[in-house]
Image: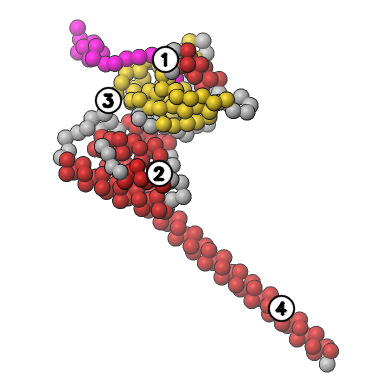
Amino acid sequence: MSQIEEMENYLEYETLPVLPLRGLVAFPEMLIHFDVGRLISMKALEQSMRDNQRIFLTAQRDIRTDIPGEDDLFVFGTVCTVKQILKLPGDNIRVLVEGTHRAVVDSFSMQDDCLFAKVFRMDTDPGRASQKRKEALVRTLQERFEEYASLSSHISHDVVMTVLDGGEPGYLADYVAQNTPLEYEVKQDLLEEVHDVRRLEQVIRVIGREIDILRIETDLQEKLKDQVDKNQREYYLREQMKVIQNELGEQDTGD
């Protein structure tokens, strides 16, 4: 038996229907809801509900692709459990899923208009960093995330409180990634980082960059507001001068 065959014996494989995500990335242990309307997504949900409600979610490389094929999808995704399906007006469906674990595609196949993937479980690595280093990284994330939330209008109080409550580095990294409006390519990179401590460090860098961008945006908005206020004041003064000049002109005519 070859080394590859021996390794495959230890891998946990399963074949699941694939639901391609556009602009979204699902993380393990997280709830995520989204709307679906494409045939390929409907077929995946139907198949999932007929079996054990398990489904493989993976992001499209290009969100503009309407009918994604194998090459249009990231091979690194998340095995999820379908928790709820709600029919919406029209042909769309709102889905609530919960991530269970990371997984990587071994092969794709098409059956009855439904895309399937043979995937193997990808467990994360807690790493060998000392407990003190982990605690320091968690505190750094909490401080930066609290600052980020104060600058952003997209982060709820509950999300901030969950981050401040702390937790294991891997879980916190995934939680922040799932609940922060980052580009899906950035989230995909975080999903593919299976080393918990490195993923937390990566999240800290990402949030730091977002803080810098938000500070610049805030500064630009304040300068723009000041300029608008100045223009409005000047306009108001000009209009006042016109009224005064008109009144003076009328008085001169009356005399």
Residue at the image position 31 percent from the left and 21 percent from the top = 121
Is the Cβ of the residue at disc 3 closer than 8 Å to that at disc 4? no
Tell me how far mark 1 sits from mark 4, CA to CA. Answer: 77 Å
Can residue 217 be seen here? yes
Tell me how far mark 2 sits from mark 1, CA to CA. Answer: 31 Å
Q: Amino acid at mark 1?
A: Asn
Residue extent of the magenta highlight: 1-18
Tell me how far mark 1 sits from mark 3, CA to CA. Answer: 21 Å
The quarter in which the C terminus is drawn is bottom right
The quarter in which the N terminus is drawn is top left
Mark in front: 1 vs 3: 1
Q: Amino acid at mark 4?
A: Lys
Residue at the image position 40 percent from the left and 24 percent from the top = 80
Vertical position of residue 201 compared to residue 50: above or below: below
Q: Which residue is mark 3?
A: 123
Image quarter of residue 24: top left
How is colour applied across the structure in the image? Answer: secondary structure
Which is more N-terminal, label 3 or label 2? 3
Q: Which residue is mark 1?
A: 52
Q: Which mark is residue 242?
A: 4
Residue at the image position 51 percent from the left and 10 percent from the top = 112
Which is more N-terminal, label 3 or label 1? 1
The residue furthest bottom is 255
Mark in front: 2 vs 1: 2
Mark in front: 4 vs 2: 2
Within 10 Å of disc 1 (Cα), the crowding (few <14, some 14-19, many 20+) is few
Is 233 magenta? The answer is: no
The residue furthest right is 254
